[in-house]
Image (spheres, rainbow, N blue to C red):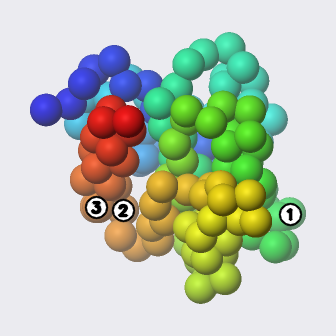
Amino acid sequence: MVNRQHRILVVDDLPDWRETLGGLLVDAGYHVLVADSYTSALGLLEAKQFDLAVLDMRLDETDEANTSGLDLAAEIAHRWPAVMAVIITGYGTQDTMRQAMEPDVHGHVLAADYIPKTQIDELVQIVRRVLAQQDTR
């Protein structure tokens, strides 16, 4: 059963994807706010409390490295360690998945999960699992 108190931040630079991701999570019973950029996401994180952030890997068309979502996940982990992150991407590689999912030198993991946009139908299940794990901490 969904805890309607869970707040989820969805960050994607593309309006269609923000609407799709946010809609899936709202339909599943979550309270969702959306942001269109790294900067707007930080503003919402500073103003509101979230349990989870769903972050696109590439948050800007000029992001040639396709890692601005990982940069945001790192900032969230540093500034809001209770907020879990799920990375969603259309530009995933084994290297970016490793960066997101393996502990860094300090033992921090940037993302609780990593999902290609081609598997979007699994998002709600992943969010439920991550939030359930968070609730048992």
Residue pointed to by mark 3: 121
Q: Is residue 123 above or below residue 76?
A: below
Residue pointed to by mark 1: 62
Question: Which x, y percent locates residue 117?
Answer: 46, 67
Residue placed furthest toward the bottom: 94
Amino acid identity at mark 2: Ile
Question: Which x, y percent locates residue 40?
Answer: 74, 31
Give the mark nearer the N terminus: 2 vs 1: 1
Q: Secondary structure at mark 1?
A: loop
Residue at image coords 55%, 56%: 111
Q: Are marks 3 and 2 in contact (CB under 8 Å)?
A: yes
Q: Secondary structure at mark 2?
A: helix
Residue pointed to by mark 2: 120
Q: Residues within 10 Å of mark 2 (few under 14, many from 20)?
A: some
Q: Is residue 62 visible?
A: yes
Question: Which x, y percent locates residue 70?
Answer: 70, 58
Residue placed furthest toward the top: 47
Quadrant for residue 94, please give it.
bottom right
Amino acid identity at mark 3: Asp
Question: Which x, y percent locates residue 130?
Answer: 36, 47
Q: Nearer the viewer, mark 3 or mark 1?
A: 3
